[in-house]
Image: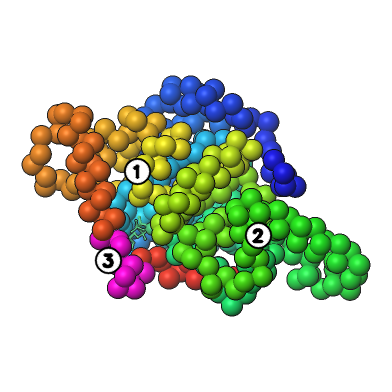
Amino acid sequence: MTDTTSVQQADDYDYDRSALRAKLARVSQEPGSAKPQPILTVDRIVRRFGGMTAVDVDHLEVQRGAITALIGPNGAGKTTFFNLITGFDRPTSAKSRFASAGDQYARWTFQGRALGSTSAYRVAQAGMVRTFQLTKALSRMTVLDNMMLGAQDQPGERMLAALFRPTWGRREQQIRTKAEELLARFKLDGKKDDYAGSLSGGQRKLLEMARALMSDPAMIMLDEPMAGVNPALTQSLLGHIESLRDQGTTVLFVEHDMHMVRHISDWVVVMAEGRIVAEGPPASVMRHQAVVDAYLGSHHDQDLGDDAVLEEDFEQAVAVEDAARAEQAETGEAAEAPSAGRED
Ligand SMILES: Nc1ncnc2c1ncn2[C@@H]1O[C@H](COP(=O)(O)OP(=O)(O)OP(=O)(O)O)[C@@H](O)[C@H]1O
Ligand SMILES: [Mg+2]
């Protein structure tokens, strides 16, 4: 590794990926199953919009050191779930001031720290950062400035530090060096002085990932990192994600691209209609009845007995969905929750 990134490390991080996979192979494949070393544990997180329940997750554990994919059809609640646990939205089941002992309310902990009423900024400081399905790079700012904004603990924002300009200057230089190293790693160094608005969709995705890494997160959450990325870049993006894991960053990502899911994930969690309906290693989870039902709906009449047919159906269902999403993107409809705009 050529940069100065120092990831928040934990003793129980499985740097050896085959050991990690062997461990996961012994984990129960029931929704909500216990993991050997959970970095994130979520309980009773419910989000309703009017009469519609977008998220209703009873229990979920994410294994430290694993690349976990969160998959599910459009509208399953994946982005809403990300918004909730990163502090960009509040659960309907949040603890209220009037809660009494014995009440059931949403609770989630990251590295043992309760995050229930923590702001998005503090969640990021706690080591959990996310990227957005619809990229949030600031178009009228340069690529490098976007990166510098991603740095945790921005000294320039603190009044007191601003009074001691020499310290501030040194820290800013460190941040700049780190930003430049990350940009080089994502092959965006040639664009550092360009406006972020001039980047292609794929380059913006890379910029967003690079920016998220400015704060040395213990876990990075990627919402559809491959969407809109040029096929020529996808392989390198996969490589980036795997090397992040290898260097000590737990990865949780939402993705519709099943090639990517199968290729890089150690564990797959399937969501449908707000609930976790299946979990398991990629190869076996895709054959799960609940997964086929989630993607095809319950009104299909194909013979689901044969695994080959099943995989084909599954992929077909995903392809139909991708086409629908592309159309949606063309007509300019945004699927992302408006609450995600509370980024700053
Ligand atoms: N702010 C909101 N107000 C009302 N409904 C919302 C809001 N945000 C999300 N929803 C609804 O909640 C459900 C879950 O949406 P969400 O965006 O989380 O799904 P998703 O799994 O991320 O889908 P996709 O794969 O298309 O990105 C959808 O029915 C969506 O329309
Ligand atoms: Mg989404």
At horizontal 80% and vertical 64% (from top left) the residue drawn is 172
Horizontal and vertical percent position of residue 270: 34, 42
Horizontal and vertical percent position of residue 243: 58, 39
Q: Would residue 309 appear left or right of 229 to someone viewing this image?
A: left
Crowd tier of the residue under label 1, counting other residues whose Cα lies within 10 Å: few below 14, some 14–19, many 20 or above: some
Crowd tier of the residue under label 3, counting other residues whose Cα lies within 10 Å: few below 14, some 14–19, many 20 or above: few
Q: Would residue 59 appear left or right of 109 to someone viewing this image?
A: left
Rounded to the nearest angstrom, the CA distance separating label 1 from label 2 is 30 Å
Where ligand 2 lies, by quadrant? bottom left
At horizontal 52% and vertical 46% (from top left) the residue drawn is 236
* Residue at the extreme left: 301
At horizontal 65% and vertical 66% (from top left) the residue drawn is 192
Q: What SS does tag 3 mark?
A: helix
- Amino acid type shown at disc 3: Glu
Question: Is 158 situated above or below 25?
Answer: below
What span is in magenta? 324-334
Horizontal and vertical percent position of residue 94: 47, 57
Q: Tell me the number on the disc at residue 281.
A: none
Mark closer to the chain start, 1 or 2: 2
Q: Would residue 296 appear left or right of 62 to someone viewing this image?
A: left
The answer to which of 171 and 238 lies nearer the viewer is 238
Rounded to the nearest angstrom, the CA distance separating label 1 from label 3 is 19 Å
Q: Tell me the number on the disc at residue 189.
A: 2
Q: Find out whether the residues at labels 1 and 3 contact each other: C-beta distance under 8 Å.
A: no
The answer to which of 180 and 88 lies nearer the viewer is 180
Please check the rendered image and state whether residue 16 is part of the magenta-colored stretch, yes or no: no
Q: Tell me the number on the disc at residue 258.
A: 1
Horizontal and vertical percent position of residue 78: 39, 53
Mark closer to the chain start, 2 or 3: 2
Q: Which residue in the protein does label 3 denote? A: 327
